[in-house]
Amino acid sequence: MPSQSNNNVAAKRELRVDRREVGARVSMVDVARLAGVSHMTVSRVINNHAAVREETRRRVLAAIDRLGYQRNTAARALATRRSGIIGVLTIETALYGPASTLYAVENAARQEGFAITITSIKTVDPATAKEGLRLLTAQGVEGIVVIAPSSQIGEALSSIRGRAAIVTAGDALAGDVPAVYVDQAGGARLATTHLLEQGAATVWHVAGPRDWLHAQARIRGWRAALKAAGRRPPPLLYGDWTPASGYHAGLTLSEKITEGDAVFVANDQMALGMLRAFHERRIRVPRDVLVVGFDDVPEAAYFTPPLSSIRQDFAAVGRNAIQLLLEEINGGHPQRASVVPAELVVRRSSVRPKG
Amino acid sequence: MPSQSNNNVAAKRELRVDRREVGARVSMVDVARLAGVSHMTVSRVINNHAAVREETRRRVLAAIDRLGYQRNTAARALATRRSGIIGVLTIETALYGPASTLYAVENAARQEGFAITITSIKTVDPATAKEGLRLLTAQGVEGIVVIAPSSQIGEALSSIRGRAAIVTAGDALAGDVPAVYVDQAGGARLATTHLLEQGAATVWHVAGPRDWLHAQARIRGWRAALKAAGRRPPPLLYGDWTPASGYHAGLTLSEKITEGDAVFVANDQMALGMLRAFHERRIRVPRDVLVVGFDDVPEAAYFTPPLSSIRQDFAAVGRNAIQLLLEEINGGHPQRASVVPAELVVRRSSVRPKG
DNA sequence: TGAAATGAGGTTAGCGCTAACGTCGTTGTG
DNA sequence: CACAACGACGTTAGCGCTAACCTCATTTCA
């Protein structure tokens, strides 16, 4: 609490231009007094309501500037019943995808005049997610963007429907929650088809964790592409997105693989681990085996060899997520889903060398 | 705005248990009515004030639970003049360090009962930083954590002193702003000394951008270690943290370097680019040249070869930053700086092979 | 036994803003 | 020239909380 005693409210209210230096808050009535108008006129100016003469507006703006006035958001939120805050529920990870999405969401929200509050969760189980959502609604958020794509979360989301608008950024979720996501299955198809076109006999797949919808969709796309080419999918391997798990998958694959095969890895970090395992086992990429990753992290072009990958436009995801959320906040019924196309970036790791 | 007309306040106030389903907010008086007490008693229960009988407390808690009541933070903030919000100003990057620090700060703040709002900035110039800080103070934050270590920002920070408590997480800044950071110079000394101990004739350094304090401190540590060993520092190379710049530095170095030299690179991503450049130029790491990076990103162990690096405890940085900030918020004069030690992680890239 | 002290609550007055309505001159219109 | 319409504000009543005081029964102790 501010330690100053409050027993002399009148004195505190007294107009002092240098108050800014002391750090005490200036209120609307202070501005009004300096501009010689009522506080309501100040409010009108700030909110761009019509019916304010140009000269009055200028006087008010000058007073605002002079006093360094900033509107009290708590009071505004209380009066309007709108907080102007959008909550983000995100998994606690420095992974490129979620982190990029977070910033895109923040940017888009800011542009729309909303502030962002975040709550991170370490795991994606329903109880943790529910607790995170509770923290957000407790802050009076008008809407929530969920960046934690996991099928386990769907249930938790339904627990707060009605309290706040909600949208998922990352992947489609079960239920009726609007979602914005990059076409994961499409990206996987792009990767797999590309590998087949490069003459791969078989395309193996190292998937992400089973409860991630991303992982599931990439599996679907991979299967679909193989099927369309009349190939039978080889056995599936699973990782947990980390380089370590990709490394282990690489060791396993190095026993099973035949020259001319290809591997589609569900993210770049696992692909990195796999490249390392292949290197140790003297399996040359791309001569012996072709590899494509997913995410196109900034480092991918500098792996050994440079890694082909599927690029996702996270900025577009963030923008669209906020747009859908705003529609929902404003009482509309937004479209169920907004799908951003994926893009294949070809580098050395997936191009069969001549000869 | 909610579209419902407000002309019948009495009707709206009427107690309806199923209101939760409709999504309408339950207020304290609703809880009070259900529990048969005054709203003030409800407030006392929620805030753990004494002077409430155990049985009354239970009745109130039951009513809160039944109605799914959540306190209106805007009203509370208005009445207490405290928002319970801590702002984070961060550069917009998925870089491992800042992202990890962000989550650590969020966790620590949550544990202390504070919510987190973030504003990201694309560049670290003073104008942009100032605008970001303005957005945060406009939200009535009680304190601000700055995760954007750049000497350019110091000036901007002073513009809001007095409006909110402030602390930087990442590196010491000019001026009197308390700071929490990992000992960058110490880490650089660790790396350089280690390389010298491995028998390196010279230790080159690829630094980060000149206006990053991190980069400057790492240069200082590198110089100090060389000096302590009686060596003269070779010419400095600069990068911009990206793998691409590390790659270019690697190409340049490949012309200048002599066998038995070593390179200390100011972060792991640039080191990755450098490894790639050395690979292309047939310079073998660690046989021909030793390399140490900085940050110890999760991928470092999977580079080719696995990269030695300097690990930073970002979680500790986040925790300490919030602790300092809270001291400042509560009117104390916190210590100027809290330094977290760095740690050397040795992997293949910096160990001279036998023979 | 009476006065003071101590619970265990209730009442009231804001916090700083906006919505809704009220007021007062000025302008247009028949 | 009277009256409506309108522009440009001002007044008032909350939004849902908490701080500070108030009340009233009980207990405590001289």
Image: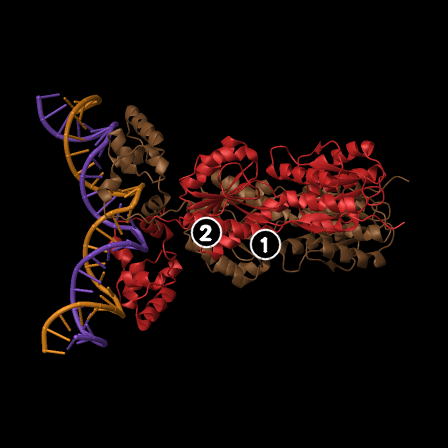
Chain colours: A red, B brown, C purple, D orange
Label 1 neighbour load within 10 Å: few <14, some 14-19, many 20+: many
Residue A170 found in image quarter: top right
Image quadrant where one finds the C terminus of chain B: top right
- Which amino acid lies under the numbered mark 1 shown in the image of this protein? Pro
Which of B204 and A295 lies nearest the eye of the viewer?
A: A295
Question: Residue A84, image x and y in percent?
Answer: 41, 51
Nearer-the-camera pick, B153 or B125: B125
The 10 Å Cα crowd at callout 2, few under 14, some 14 to 19, many 20 or more, is many
Q: Which chain does the numbered disc 1 sit on?
A: B
User: Which residue does the image show at 73% across and 45% down from the upper left?
Assistant: A193
Tag 2: residue type?
Ala
Secondary structure, mark 1, is: loop
Residue highlighted by disc 2? A115
Residue B255 visible, this orientation:
yes
Left or right of B190, for residue A217: left
The residue tagged with tag 2: helix, strand or loop? Answer: strand
Disc 1 vs disc 2: which is toward the camera? 2
* Residue B296 visible in the current orientation: no
Q: Which mark, residue B190?
A: none
Q: Which residue is mark 1?
A: B149
Q: CA distance from mark 1 to mark 2?
A: 23 Å
Residue B42, x across and y down, in percent = 29, 34
**Mark 2 and mark 1 in contact (Cβ < 8 Å)?**
no
